[in-house]
Amino acid sequence: MTTTAPIADSRAIALTHYAARGVLESVLSRHDATFQQSVTLRVIAVAEGPIERDAAVGQVVQSLKTDAARIQGTVEELVSKGLCATEGAALRLTDAGREFYDTVTAETAEISARIWADIPAEDLAAAGRVLAVVTERANAELAALRS
């Protein structure tokens, strides 16, 4: 019996995204957090010190292809949960935010290690190249649609 390798297309990428996101959201739900909160907090967590609020919001908007008002609301949720704090026009991670980020990162890293285990490096490199091209082209198409 011969099996044909599946073709990478938009549906395959979407199914992969939603499977991985489902895993992350399962972890986040145990910590009473949402996907948008996680993405937003990551931007703040990996910044080298306080990050301007508009810059943080802009990064999340670019990543999630959503509107700034929605992410501004997400920032307010994070502040009210005590995971980040404002310093003038900037945001900084709190100790509780660092603990949350480190915990969720560690939990998802364990699962990710199982998911990605034993995939040859050359396959990962090829997939990475293809996904980078698709992302670049999709971003260009989205920009054209919005202009």
Image (tube, rainbow, N blue to C red):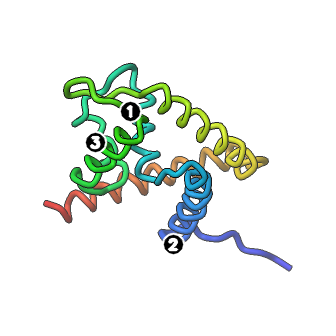
Residue 93 higher or lower than 21, as above or below: above
Residue indicated by mark 1: 84
Mark 2 or 1 closer to N-term?
2
Mark 2 — residue? 11
Q: Amino acid at mark 2?
A: Arg
Q: Secondary structure at mark 3?
A: helix
User: Marks 2 and 1, how far apart in space?
Assistant: 36 Å
Circle 2 or circle 3, nearest the eye: 3
Q: How many dots with numbers?
A: 3
Give the Cα distance between marks 2 and 3.
28 Å
Q: Nearer the viewer, mark 2 or mark 1?
A: 1
Q: Of 9 and 69, which appears nearest the observer? A: 69
Percent of width and height locating residue 91: 31, 29
Q: Residues within 10 Å of mark 2 (few under 14, many from 20)?
A: few
**SS state under label 2:** helix
The label number, if any, that marks residue 103 in the structure image: none
Among numbered discs 3 and 1, the one appearing first in the sequence: 3
In the structure shown, which secondary structural element does the residue marked by tag 1 occupy?
Answer: strand
Identify the image quadrant of residue 139: bottom left
- The outermost residue toward the bottom is 1
Q: Where is mark 3, residue-wise?
A: 57
